[in-house]
Image: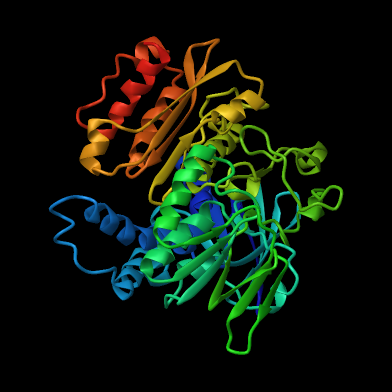
Amino acid sequence: MNAESSREFDVIVIGAGAVGENVADRVVRGGLTAVIVESELVGGECSYWACIPSKALLRPGSVLHAAQGIPGASEAVTGVIDAESALKHRDWFTNNWQDGGQVEWLDSAGIELIRGRGRITGPREVQVDGLDGNSYALKAHHAVVVATGSTPTIPDIEGLKDVPFWTTRGATAAKVIPQRLAVLGGGVAGVELAQAFARLGSVVTIIARGRLLSSYPEEAANLVLSGLRADGVTVHLHTDVDKAEKNDDGSVTVTFNGQAVTADTLLVASGRHPALANLGLENVGVEPQNGKPLRLTTDASGLVEGPASDGTSGLWLYAAGDAAGKVLLTHQGKYEARATGDAIVARANGKLQGTPRPWTAYAHTANEHAIPSVVFTDPEVASVGPSLEQALLQGKHVTGVELPIDVSGSQLYSPDYKGWAQIVVDEDRKVILGATFVGPGVAELLHSATIAIVGEVPLDRLWHAVPSYPTISEVWLRLLEKYGL
């Protein structure tokens, strides 16, 4: 190291993704000083390797497929997707993996940036090995926030560590479209990227240990499965991979159930877990339990519960976003970040003691009631709150109302529109607990459902929220009518 400097700030944030940026922004708005420590691109996974590039790769296929289903437009659409142009558009969306604009924003917001790898060395203390060759000893007056995101979970498959493979980063940053692509995993990332590459020209095979999209209703998963197969994707469900091996020509062969699939590229999309390795958490008493991967236990404001926030060390260590391990979704992580930042400011000013009350500005209450998520396949899946099956497992007194999406708005969207909707009604309070919509264009239905759940809108009042005609939102009316209103 060339030099070491000691610096003090009110708040130190480790990680400059969307979550870290939001935490730092909220504390600076609240009058505190903040520094962000980041060893990669400012803006994080979502901006460069996840949400943004994956949706950019999916969009051309969705638009083309929609046009092909409309008489008049279908006759005008005579070509196929230009993969090179699609990749260039993806590059533009990711700003060619340059973070200059994000760095400028940090500066304008009054947030200092240190590029390097941060490690907690003691209560409110972070050591940074700077990418500039210098070492920085940082001290926080009030809080250290872990906002390091998540990292891919790689399954224990014979030979996998010896073959080249993509994780989601490799797929979303691809420079060429492989002729053959094998995808391990049937979750959100697996199905989205499988469909994107199938429509960009790859011959795609999915191999999933269970069914597709296991956290969503099976009716939703089946419609996505039909969509994938319509795009030529071969799907093997409830299948364990036995072995992966590299061939002499650079391709990879995956064997399972006595079968073999050979692909030019292998994508491992088998989930993610909090990125907590090498952060020095053991230096403040936070260690793995029972040999399992480290997980942080946090209260409603993101405050880490356990040794790091006990005794003389005080209340100082927080986690937000994927690093907190509760909800691995960017928008929900940003929500957590805003509440965590405000809680830090409130505690610093003596305005918050103990655990915040639910639904206050300092609490992550929506994590327990209304987590919206969208699978951007074609058809889309949009869901918030528990499914009927999940609510019943929770012991709730609920009724499920399901029907195909077949209204004038959906028929206008496409004469061959196929969709499905479900609401979950709390019979004790007569409010909606959950909702799921499946079909082209349903993502924009989701926020109305989220508002209804968070606002605990009584069904007899929701009945007066009249959907515009002719829109797909008319499905709300049909659901309430089927319920009996």
**425 or 149: nearer the eye?**
425
In the picture as drawn, the residue positioned furthest to the right comes out as: 290
**155 or 244: nearer the eye?**
244
Query: Residue at 59% of width from left, 38% of height from top?
Result: 344
In the picture as drawn, the residue positioned furthest to the bottom comes out as: 248
In percent of width and height, residue 233 lies at 47, 62
Q: Vertical placement of 77 versus 473: above or below?
A: below
On the question of residue 346 being in view, the answer is yes
Answer with left or right where residue 371 lies relative to residue 268.
Answer: left
Q: Quadrant of the N terminus?
A: bottom right
What colouring does the structure picture have? rainbow
Residue 479, picture quadrant:
top left
Q: How many marks?
A: 0
In the picture as drawn, the residue positioned furthest to the front comes out as: 258
Query: Residue at 48% of width from left, 63% of height from top?
Result: 49
Query: Residue at 81% of width from left, 55% of height from top?
Result: 283
On the question of residue 28 being in view, the answer is no
Answer with left or right where residue 425 lies relative to residue 64.
Answer: right
In percent of width and height, residue 266 lies at 57, 72
Query: Residue at 40% of width from left, 56% of height from top?
Result: 230
In percent of width and height, residue 301 lies at 61, 34
Q: Vertical placement of 474 versus 82: above or below?
A: above
Residue 166, picture quadrant:
bottom right
Answer with left or right where residue 44 lies relative to residue 447.
Answer: right
Q: Quadrant of the C terminus?
A: top left
